[in-house]
Amino acid sequence: MRKFDIKTWMLKAGRIWTFGGLALMLSVPAFAGDSSCCTGSACTDCNDCQKIFSDAAEELKNLDVPCYSGACCSTVDSCGVGCCGSSCDGCTGLMSAFDDDCGGNWMEDNGLSLTGWVEAGITFNPAQSNTNAPVGFNNRANDLMLNQLYFILSKDAAANADEFGWGGQVDFIFGHDSDDTSTFGGKDGSFDNDWTDNSDGDIDNMGIAMPQLYASFYAPIGNGVTVDVGHFYTIIGYEVVTAPDNFFYSHAYTMLYGEPFTHTGVKMNTDLTSNINVTAGIVTGWDDWENEYTSNSFLGGITWTSDSEATSLAFAIVSGDEVNFSGNDESHRNMYSIVLTQAVSDKLTYVFQHDRGQQNGLVAGEQSTEWYGINQYLFYDLDDNNRVGLNYEWFRDDDGSQIGNGAANYYVLRAGLNHKLRECLTVRPEVRWDWADNGARPYDDGADGSQFTFGTDVIWTY
């Protein structure tokens, strides 16, 4: 809600008075003139009188209207829709704190953006009183979680596509997801892995982490080239860490155990054509801050999008040395991901994902270990505020190197709803069935080969 400023209101009221008085003075001849006006030879344009009023009305229409609660949602003013563009459903972002009196925004004027969200949820597990493992992120059973209190401060390096630019981004997270988003893949105590006991693996831990911290540089070369230097999220896979960018509250095994979350290094991104986008970079490895070994890893990807944007196909790969089973030696790891997204209709979308990873010496006694899987999603938009989704996943941990229960297949069936209570407030209930074969019993503290959970979270974006 805007603050009512009496000084501003009086100045604008004065302008209205001035223009109104001018219109009245100019219109006097039309009423005070002789009766021959518009009929005699002295009157050449019978539209003059109407033009005077229309010009005055146009001036009045273009005046700034002061922002106060009485006008909210009922008038369109010069700043936006009601109350200078603020939302009438209670969705006011962090950027609004930097608004001035309808003249602009200090952050926006300097090319900066401050956004974020808070995510909290609970997962009911009738077979457990503590953990949903090996399910991650929403791993606490029957207990409320503050998953993510998230802030993003950014500056778009490519704000002007015709000029060289610089920018960057800093992401800050507080909550139960901090240990999953820190640099847990690197050396002990590196960067945020040692902040607030993130490295302890305690499911009750609520800590802080900084999953992204990078500078960006843009050059108007070709279709534009952007280079990011620092710590950033991976381009691998379909599901991501940031809660509002996923449909489901819980995560797939493919994302949890088969893919990196973050990298540190440098990457370049550009559009080769209107349909093809490429990314290439050199990074220190998986989920780390500094390189543990002498060699770096390659990170790259290419995405094709159809002219209609109904179809997209993305391929991404990361290849380099990572720690092996001994914990103090290295071996080469290759991992790729393919994601196909197809809009079947205006309301129905299908997603197909395939991942495969391989590393030598990751398990003692095994020359080569591998993991792979297929994920399929189906989403249907019921209306502007409701979307339903289904997911079926098959994840093969061929040598037990990723989840740790020996060679096994893991299966997941999820069904969920995304319901927008407001533009900034979404609730995501879901039901999930997990099971494993080949004698693996990863659920209920190793006592069961399957588990059923019901979870829901709420995301408020700001």
Image (cartoon, rainbow, N blue to C red):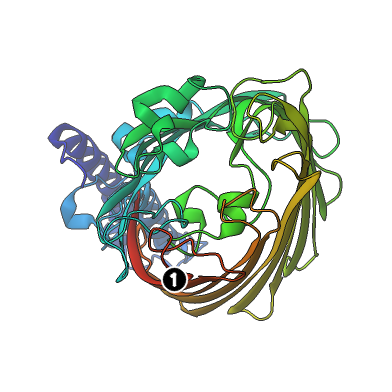
Image point (63%, 29%), residue name = 327
Query: Residue 36's quadrant in the figure?
Result: bottom left
Query: Residue 128's quadrant in the figure?
Result: bottom left
Q: Is residue 454 visible?
A: yes
Depth check: 203 or 389 in front? 203
Image point (43%, 30%), residue name = 199
Image point (32%, 69%), residue name = 127
Depth check: 245 or 441 in front? 441
Depth check: 387 or 79 in front? 387
Depth check: 375 or 312 in front? 375
The residue that mark 1 highlights is 39
Q: Give the vertical position of 322 relative to 420 (above or below).
A: above
Image point (37%, 46%), residue name = 117
- The number of numbered discs placed on residues in the rendered structure image is 1
Q: Residue furthest front?
A: 365
Is 12 on the left or on the right of 290, as rendered?
A: left
Q: Position of residue 173 (x, y in %)?
A: 39, 36
Is 167 on the left or on the right of 235, as rendered?
A: left
Is 339 on the left or on the right of 99, as rendered?
A: right
Is 245 on the left or on the right of 454, as rendered?
A: right
Q: Position of residue 325 (x, y in %)?
A: 66, 36
Q: Residues within 10 Å of mark 1 (few under 14, many from 20)?
A: few
Q: Is residue 417 visible?
A: no
Q: Give the vertical position of 330 relative to 234 (above or below).
A: above
* Label 1 secondary element: loop
Q: Give the vertical position of 274 relative to 217 (above or below).
A: below
Kind of residue at disc 1: Thr
Q: Position of residue 316 (x, y in %)?
A: 77, 48
Q: Position of residue 394 (x, y in %)?
A: 64, 69
